[in-house]
Amino acid sequence: MTNPISVRSEVGKLRQVMLHRPGEELENLMPEYLTRQLFDDIPYLVHAKQEHDAFADTLRKCGVEVLYLDELLAQALTVGNAREEIIWEYVREANINASGAEQAVNAYLSSLPIPELIATMAGGVRKSQLDGVERRHLVDYLDDQYPFYVDPMPNLYFTRDPFSNVGSGVLISKMANNVRQRETLFAKYIFKYHPVYKWVTKYHDRNDVHNIEGGDVLVLTSDTIAIGMSERTSAQAVELIANRLICEKTGIRRIIALDIPKLRAFMHLDTVMTMVDRDAFVIHPNIRTSMRSFVLTKNNGRLVIHESEHDVADVMKEALGLDNIRFIRCGGGSIIDAAREQWNDGANTLAVAPGEVITYSRNYVTNRILRENGIIVHEIPSAELSRGRGGPRCMSMPFIRDAIDN
């Protein structure tokens, strides 16, 4: 059978992508718990859905087939005992403290049809949704003021993070923050039970020890992967994945590990640097000089790590087999524009073809500079989606993308 996953570049023609349309999980954000949910603000769901639909429509107009996370998961949960298994695992990982509430949540979820079940798992379970949960122990009273039995997953529309497709395989993430770890359950069950995707080779699992998130993984070419060592992806995970990926079967010959500041402002590699053409990247203006680069290869089956003494531009030139590359600065030369547009993910672009990208309309300075550099820019509305601190690349997971190798 034809492999349903084939991602061999960052900018080759995008054929198929998976999205998650925001749902009730955003309505369950509360100001006093935003930090707990890794949010800075509360998007207005009605407009967030409209903006996300505009994103999906833009992709379709660019010739991209759009898949949806909830639809793939629904198809997977009709197979065997998948529905019962995911409910059990979801409830277990929710760490419900209240006495008797775990059983009540399990029973409630088990009563729901699959589409509503998926929406509820994403949205979380409010205490007001369940009746008759008796307070029997001291912890039940102490936890009484918190309005949820199970927290929502408001970050779910950033589909890039819970897993990443590399070549013809998948890396299911181990998320750095527990509040996002349950998102990877959806990936687990798609790649375990879905009749199309259960055959896909897994090179990392959600239960692996070391943290990695998909926003740190850039597929530069068929044989070279860049991975950011960020606040959410550890050096140990990069080394583990290099040992698994670099082999004759995958065709991957090297991993470029980029050490980026461990700050929320530089959350993932793709928030500070994304590829926009065969020879061009848009990049946070302050990141270039602060990144150390390491090239991981194998010699006679053993991993070899070499710290590059060169600027990251030279590392990328060698990786891409080019004489020159272009670094296009987010916000241009203005420190004010750069700071504002970096905050609104001006460097987080999604390429749909070489030299053709989707961006947020609000980043007008960077968009203008991209066009001045010959890049075709499709702008999408972003007043609400951007409140989650992620851009078009963050909101998309390619399933099929052409290679760009010569």
Image (cartoon, grey):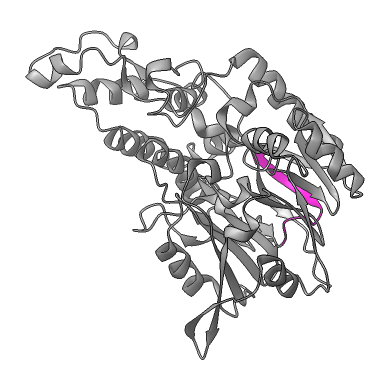
Q: Does 377 appear above or below 223?
A: above
Residue at screen point 45% across, 22% down: 123
x, y percent for residue 179: 38, 35
Q: Is residue 11 magenta?
A: yes
Q: Is residue 376 magenta?
A: no
Instruction: Report which quarter residue 332 is drawn in.
Output: top right
Residue at screen point 15% across, 17% down: 142
x, y percent for residue 222: 70, 69
Between 123 and 332, the one nearer to me in the picture: 332
For the C terminus, the image quarter is: bottom right
x, y percent for residue 273: 66, 51
Q: Which residues are magenta?
A: 9-18
Q: Is residue 164 left or right of residue 311?
A: left
Residue at screen point 58% across, 56% down: 217
Between 221 and 324, the one nearer to me in the picture: 324
For the N terminus, the image quarter is: bottom right
- What number of labels is visible? 0
